[in-house]
Image: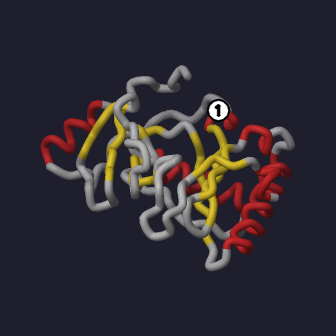
Amino acid sequence: MKLVHPQFHYVELAIGGVNKRGNIVTLIEAVAPVDTIDCFTTMFRFDKKFVAYVKDTGSVAGYAGPCWCDWLWYDIDAPILDEAVLTLAKLVKRIESIDSKLPNVLRTYFSGAKGFHCGIPIAAFGGNLKPSGGFAQTMRLIAKKIAHGIKYDDIYSTTRLWRMPNTINGKTGLRKVLISLEDVL
């Protein structure tokens, strides 16, 4: 897959829990070992400015430089999984009301716990979005406008860690796995 904004090819990788921060790698190096429990990367990608920042400060905390993400993600959780399914269905209907073709390009995962991660490719929004220091906030605004009152978790912080697909949730023993919307809805 050809990257949009290929200079943004660094992520933070945390293997073994969210407390294992500070390991900056390229996308190619961001691989979870088989059967890894609690493995995360940053949701956003970064350029060399991020690498220099972490090297200089010893932490990702406070980084406000440019970032990029190929997907607008939603994190839908509920106390009961059936409630999360209903919320996901509402979100998909809302997305379909904006553009009937969008549900065909969504990427949806069972999160490994009590909900779903649902993504819309950034390419669906045209070519106007660019990496910036405010990109995470831009994603927050777009997500809110699309969801229009549908409940989801606010995950739009620049250095937010995001569970990697096919890794195991340490609390539930379940994997984050790609699913078909038809199977869920």
In x, y percent, where is residue 72?
59, 47
On the picture, is 118 further left or further right than 162? right
Q: Quadrant of residue 146?
A: bottom right
Looking at the image, residue 138 lies above or below residue 18 = above
In x, y percent, where is residue 69?
50, 40
Q: Residue at x 63, y 74 (%)?
A: 78
On the picture, is 31 further left or further right than 108? left
Looking at the image, residue 130 lies above or below residue 41 = above
Identify the amino acid type marked 1: Ala
In x, y percent, where is residue 73?
59, 51
Looking at the image, residue 32 lies above or below residue 74 = above
Q: Which residue is mark 1?
A: 123
Q: Is the N terminus in the top left, top right, bottom left or bottom right quadrant?
A: top right
**Given the current orientation, which residue lies at the most extreme top position?**
2
Q: Residue at x 65, y 52 (%)?
A: 118
Residue 175 appears in view = yes
> Is residue 77 or residue 17 the one in the foreground?
17
**Given the current orientation, which residue lies at the most extreme bottom position?**
79
Residue 8 appears in view = no
Q: What is the basis of the colouring in this image?
A: secondary structure
Q: Is the C terminus in the top left, top right, bottom left or bottom right quadrant?
A: bottom right
Badge 1 marks a residue whose secondary structure is helix
On the picture, is 20 further left or further right than 155? left
Looking at the image, residue 104 lies above or below residue 62 = above
Q: Quadrant of residue 114?
A: bottom right
Q: Residues within 10 Å of mark 1 (few under 14, many from 20)?
A: few
> Is residue 121 or residue 176 the one in the foreground?
176
Q: Residue at x 55, y 50 (%)?
A: 139
Q: Residue at x 58, y 55 (%)?
A: 141
> Is residue 20 or residue 36 the one in the foreground?
36
